[in-house]
Image (cartoon, grey):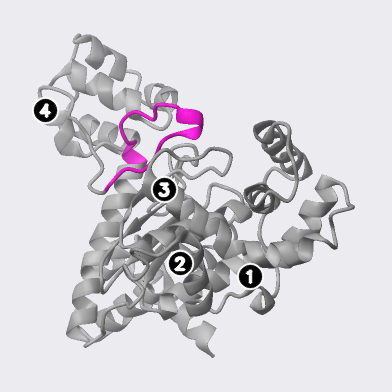
């Protein structure tokens, strides 16, 4: 057993101190004074979020994402190698996408027409097409911010895509995703495009991430993102996707026509008024105002930071999603389209119940039955 590998695994654990507290002998293993038993090593792998096979290597592995990495870090911060949690949700999403692609082909479902259709389009053209296809023009937006997220997830699935909106790995509340590591990702496939939103960010942030990942699908280029409107991405793809997301949520032509009615207000009132109209976050509106040159900012970065601080002071967790009862969260964490396909195929005997339970990250057949009943109840 390599002490170096054990130390590497401990260092990558979500909470190394919790691991050493629960398993004090870990420090002896890393020092080379003793070795773990098979049972202890299995427990250590689970607590650190490390695949068991990695612990049998002689040297720490070089871990890479299986999809393009567009993360630049806020302000150019070096993000290092991907965490076990990020790798886990990406690989899980790939497995789900692979299953659904086969399901779609077997059931004669066609390609999702929007995949790659914006290649060669300007950001404004792509955003206009997204609003049209998703039926999300400004005048069509209704309800709360939570309603917007729910609608956008549903609208993308209506096109044939898959969605995941969750704050954790599997259903493990001890493996929460880090919003400073990634905000979302898109897996491109002509039949089963998938967008993933990390819900450990505010609800308004989730809405922007959804729009950003939709842009990736429309462009036909997937990958992991860490978008932040405060910074102008260096990569051309991320710049374009950010611009599309901003224009999708706050169309510049529409903003110009409305700004005259709020231009005499102070900045905070402007942002609140316009955010209510566009059903998005004030930070998105602030970025759109700056992009359109409708207001002069001496230091846009500082103004943006001030707005972030103001929002945090209002409510640090008001917009957090994914909480509430277990069953209510599952259509978001798994995706309703995938859930219904898995349940239908399993009950029809084409997919084993154990495979369906595994792909949906449920713990038992009882959970499966209860979840199937819950989804059935939504329809009635």
Image: 180 above or below 348: above
Task: Give the Cα distance between marks 4 and 3.
Answer: 36 Å
What stretch of residues is rendered in magenta?
68-85
Question: Which callout, 2 or 4, points at the residue further toward the start of the chain?
Answer: 4
Res 238 label: 3
| Residue 225 shows up from this direction | yes
Task: Decide which of 241, 74 is in the foreground and name it.
Answer: 241
Task: Give the Cα distance between marks 3 and 2.
Answer: 14 Å
Residue at mark 1: 147
Label 4, residues with CA under 10 Å away: few <14, some 14-19, many ≥20: some
Residue at mark 4: 57
Question: Which callout, 2 or 1, points at the residue further toward the start of the chain?
Answer: 2
Disc 2 and disc 1 in contact, CB within 8 angstroms: no
Task: Give the Cα distance between marks 1 and 4.
Answer: 48 Å
Q: Nearer the viewer, mark 1 or mark 4?
A: 1
Q: Residue furthest right?
A: 264
Residue 253, position in %: x, y?
A: 65, 66
Is residue 352 shown left or right of residue 302?
Answer: left
Secondary structure beneath disc 1? Answer: helix
Res 26 label: none
Residue at mark 2: 126
């Amino acid at each position: 057993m390599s002490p170096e590998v054990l130390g590497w695994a401990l260092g990558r654990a979500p909470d190394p101190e919790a691991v050493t507290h629960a398993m004090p002998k870990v420090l002896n293993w890393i020092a080379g004074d003793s070795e773990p038993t098979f049972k202890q090593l299995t427990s250590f792998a689970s607590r650190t979020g490390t695949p068991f096979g990695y612990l049998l290597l002689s040297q720490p592995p070089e871990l890479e994402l299986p999809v393009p990495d567009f993360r630049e870090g806020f302000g150019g911060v070096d993000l290092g190698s991907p965490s076990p949690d990020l790798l886990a949700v990406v690989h899980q999403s790939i497995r789900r996408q692979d299953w659904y692609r086969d399901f779609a082909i077997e059931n004669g479902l066609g390609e999702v027409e929007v995949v790659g259709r914006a290649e060669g389009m300007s950001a404004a053209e792509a955003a206009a097409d997204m609003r049209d296809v998703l039926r999300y023009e400004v005048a069509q937006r209704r309800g709360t911010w939570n309603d917007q997220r729910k609608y956008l997830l549903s609208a993308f699935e209506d096109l044939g895509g898959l969605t995941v909106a969750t704050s954790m790995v599997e259903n493990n509340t001890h493996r929460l995703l880090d919003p400073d590591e990634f905000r979302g990702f898109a897996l491109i496939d002509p039949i089963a495009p998938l967008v993933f939103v990390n819900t450990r960010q505010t609800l308004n942030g989730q809405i922007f991430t959804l729009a950003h990942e939709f842009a990736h699908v429309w462009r036909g280029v997937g990958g992991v993102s860490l978008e932040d409107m405060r910074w102008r991405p260096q990569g051309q793809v991320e710049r374009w996707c950010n611009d599309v997301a901003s224009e999708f949520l706050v169309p510049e032509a529409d903003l110009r026509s409305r700004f005259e009615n709020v231009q005499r207000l102070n900045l905070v009132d402007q942002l609140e008024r316009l955010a209510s109209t566009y059903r998005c976050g004030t930070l998105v509106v602030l970025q759109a105002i700056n992009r359109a040159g409708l207001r002069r900012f001496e230091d846009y970065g500082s103004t943006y930071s001030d707005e972030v601080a103001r929002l945090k002071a209002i409510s640090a967790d008001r917009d957090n999603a994914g909480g509430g009862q277990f069953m209510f969260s599952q259509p978001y964490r798994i995706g309703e389209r995938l859930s219904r396909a898995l349940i239908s195929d399993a009950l029809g005997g084409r997919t084993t119940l154990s495979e369906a339970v595994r792909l949906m990250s449920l713990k038992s057949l009882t959970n499966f039955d209860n979840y199937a009943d819950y989804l059935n109840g939504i329809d009635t």
